[in-house]
Image (cartoon, rainbow, N blue to C red):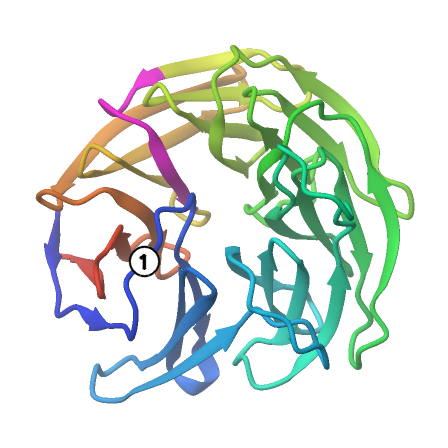
Amino acid sequence: MYHKEKSIQIKNSASALYNNLCVLRIAPRRLTYFTVVHANVVNMVSASWDGLNYSHRQLQSKEPNVATSPSLIMQAAFCVLPSRDLLVVTSQKGIQIYESDGSIMVYWHALDTPETPTAQAVFARGIAAVWENYICVGLSSCGILVFDVPSKGSNITLSEVLEEHKEPITDLAQECSGSQDCIADLVSADDSGTLCVWKSGEEFQLLNKIGGFDMSCSSVKLWKGTAVAGYGTGQIRLYEAVTGILHAEVNAHARWIYSLDIAPFSGLLLSAAEDSFVRVWHLTVTPESNTVEVAHLHNECVTDTQICGAKFCDGDGYAFAVTGYDLNEIIRYTQT
């Protein structure tokens, strides 16, 4: 179903972080941006669709105008809002928001770090763009910051802090189907496996809290009202987001899942784990019977590689890309 394409070389290898790959498709310019985190650096690659031109950029996590050592980056993700595309980088020191090509930093938010070192690490992780003007970022202190983003300029403000989780946030996801019928438009996950389902607005509203099993939920997606969660057990669970009804449980991988992605137009689901496998599934939602079915379509094995990032490169799932711990390349696959 998929075949391997020519890989894209990156300047530094990928760190072993959840969801360590992000992709932004720029259709008018026939370009695709890729980001991969290595320690305190974000590797950015701009690739032309014909595969002939590549340009590289590296972003460091430094506080603006402060001569401190760079902090470890936890995640980099593109946030697509109706009015603008932005790149959000989270680290142990704070949250940086850039223009999507990484050229200009438009906002910096410092994290509250204790004056004396504690056993509890401080970091931000989990990034999602919600509704028309919000960017949400999860924290190790269990909260979720909600930023109000103007249609242009750098006057970004912190509008709300959501405090429902009891464990550090692992991932956030917005409703990706584009459907206006879905009540919930944000889901958050934490280290205990708990999922919180939200409705965005001037004040975010908690719709449901789905209990975990004391096993970390490392990656989560929201599609057509269905929350798709990947766990350290290698399992994928599909819940009806608003009610918490469990539609399906799949023993998808032999080891810890690091990344999930959904192609919103086709319902293809991508899962990637420490077991070297990337798997493609197909989700079918039947509203009349209130059921979700999962079918396995395809496997790829990246031999002897702890996979840490996997993303579709388009909304139909025609192509996907993969990163692995200590690999200096982004591996690409395209449908045959």
Quadrant of residue 33 within the rendered picture: bottom left
Residue 75 colored in magenta in the image: no
Q: Whole-percent x and y of residue 241?
A: 62, 24
Which quarter of the rendered picture does the C terminus lie within? bottom left
What's drawn in magenta, residue-wise?
Answer: 250-262
Instruction: Give the class, few, some or many, for how many residues have Cα within 10 Å of label 1's Cα (few <14, many ≥20).
Output: many
Vertical arrangement, residue 29 with respect to residue 263, above or below: below
Camera-nearest residue between 296 and 41: 41
Q: For this view, does 242 lie left or right of residue 60? A: right
Q: Main secondary structure of the magenta part?
A: strand
Camera-nearest residue between 190 and 204: 190
Residue 256 colored in magenta in the image: yes
Vertical arrangement, residue 205 with respect to residue 239, above or below: below
Q: Whole-percent x and y of residue 107?
A: 74, 72
Q: For this view, does 116 lie left or right of residue 324? A: right
Q: For this view, does 131 lie left or right of residue 308? A: right
Q: Looking at the picture, which amino acid does disc 1 mark?
A: Ala
Quadrant of residue 333 within the rendered picture: bottom left
Vertical arrangement, residue 41 with respect to residue 122, above or below: below
The residue at the point 41 percent across, 15 percent down is 248
The residue at the point 56 percent across, 76 percent down is 100
Residue at the far front: name it. 116
Q: Whole-percent x and y of residue 206?
A: 80, 27
Camera-nearest residue between 30 and 306: 306
Q: For this view, does 156 lie left or right of residue 96? A: right
The residue at the point 54 percent across, 79 percent down is 102
Pointer 1: what residue? Answer: 14
